[in-house]
Amino acid sequence: MPTYSYLPLRYDDSIRVIELSRGTNEDSSVHCNITRRRLSDPMLSYEAISYTWGDPLALELLFCGDHNAELSITRNCYNALRSLRRSDKSRTIWIDAICIDQQNILERSSQVRIMDRIYSFASRVVVYLGEETPGSQLLFDELVEADNLYHVTQSFEGRPWPNSELIHELDNLFRRPWFSRIWVIQEVCVAREVIMVCGTSYASMLALFQCTLGYLNHRVTISNIPVSVLAAIYGSSDWRRGDAATSIWKLLADTRECGATDRRDKIFALKALVEDDQRELDQLIDYSRSIERVFNDVTMLLLPRVRLWLLLAVRHPHTLKMPSWMPDWSGKSTPNITWYLGAVPLANAKEEFMISQLKCSHTECIGQHTILHVQGIQHSRITHLGVPLDFEGAEEFCYQALHHAIPELEVPGLRPACGNPCRDILPPPIFEGKWNTNFLWISRLFVVTDLGRSKWVVEKVEIQSITTELQNCRIFLTNDGTIGLAPTEACEGDMLCILRGSHSPSILRQRRENGWNLVSGDCFVPGELGNGTDDDDLFSTYVDAHRDKEQEFLIW
């Protein structure tokens, strides 16, 4: 069989659609015709498919055109086509892995720039969640009943509270890859209509949303409602407040946990979600640029608006070939609450930093070193560190550690079994009683429901939030007794610093040559240096009070 060869797209609004040949799930092969069309064609009608690519090494053959030319696609894409084809007639769809020539970088870039139009012009967006299981079938039977009620009454009133089995299946469904993929947010946000498919079962996103709320506006799942579901229900209005930089800043926080096969897509997939002027992101969408170049460009787009609050996005250091103070926008660490809420400095706030650039001919650099100049003070030096906190698959470890810090803490179903893990996470001088420290500051990292109880009762859903917040962090102690949380990569000798215009204490490491590297722009320190404050000038005021220690930091 010949290999399929793409014909070039000729116009700015050109796309390809496929006519998926009829067939049954028992058929062993999938056939289609690929044609070029224009979005401006009033006769164009198609459904757009939202799915996940799956394992890029697990491939199947799609047969195209009259000569059955072969095109390799991922097994998940293949399964989606098999599930979506009709038994009696063909079906016209758009699906990215087939309709975009993935080997043509220029075409990929140009098609991604109009991706929002492709999904918004579709008659509807079909979300393929994967193959069905007995559990998913049970859940979709419930969602179909809910949809049927809504079609008759325009309300979900009367549906019973989901039982424990349904709640378990809701949590299982939200663990499917589709719900954590960055691209799907845009795809459902701009859609005229969204329908979900799991195996051969169909249901609406609205029914899923209402079922997750128990049909009574109260979440029943342990899992948070995925951003993709919220986008399908509410659209992008919450992200479109303010200018493009403000929108992108909020979006990057809200989508921090979302994944992408290509790290650049953590930026590119946001285009349709920002405010109406999308020219800035259009200029960024270019697959010929390196990851570092894309992240550098979005950082420089944000910097004039968010200023040094940008450092909140550097909770953990990165290993990319770009300045240490520029965030790795593909990271998944939980954002500081100030960043999460999309807060930015006042428009008339004083600019407390300067940028300089040094040209560089090193082949692995992006062509220049961008240096951040900022005033601040060296507060104290890290002298002791606990072991990194790692809660992967170890719920009881979390309880042991927190119970040692807060003896009044009680978690239903777990017994206090404080042992070596507690000793290890605390720097030795603290555990040995050489520093008198009040550990109640740890409670600021999570929500405790009722401080009036004799025991602090924390539900397991809150334990999950705690572990996410503390994962890959470690408790540190400085030479003046300051205690706080730092990333795993922090070392003894690193400096806890207060920088003008920042919104959280920072940890800096002195370079051998000159200047500093940023280890963390969002470490947690209780008391007067506590982050998450509403005071825009807190750290500048702190530096003013210690002018005798003030210095300029050159952060590379």
Image (cartoon, helix red, strand yellow):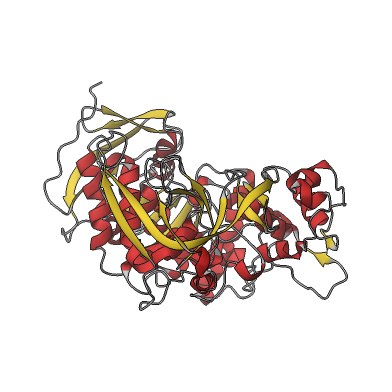
- Considering depth in this image, is 283 or 130 the residue closer to the camera? 283
Image quadrant occupied by the N terminus: top left
Q: Nearer the viewer, residue 99 or 107?
A: 107
Q: Residue furthest top?
A: 1
Q: Can residue 517 be seen at all in this image of the molecule?
A: yes
Q: Residue 275: which quarter of the image?
A: bottom left
Residue 387 at x, y percent in the picture: 70, 42
Residue 371 picture location, percent across and down: 35, 52
**Count of marks, rendered view:** 0
Q: Position of residue 274 (x, y in %)?
A: 34, 65
Q: Position of residue 123 (x, y in %)?
A: 31, 60
Which residue is at the front of the view, 230 or 291?
291
Q: Residue at x 39, y 76 (%)?
A: 349
- In the displayed structure, 138 sits above or below 500; it is above
Of all residues, the one furthest to the front in this rendering is 548
Which quadrant holds residue 455?
Answer: bottom right
Please tell me which residue is depicted at 54% across the width and 69% down the height of the picture: 546
Q: Is residue 119 visible?
A: no
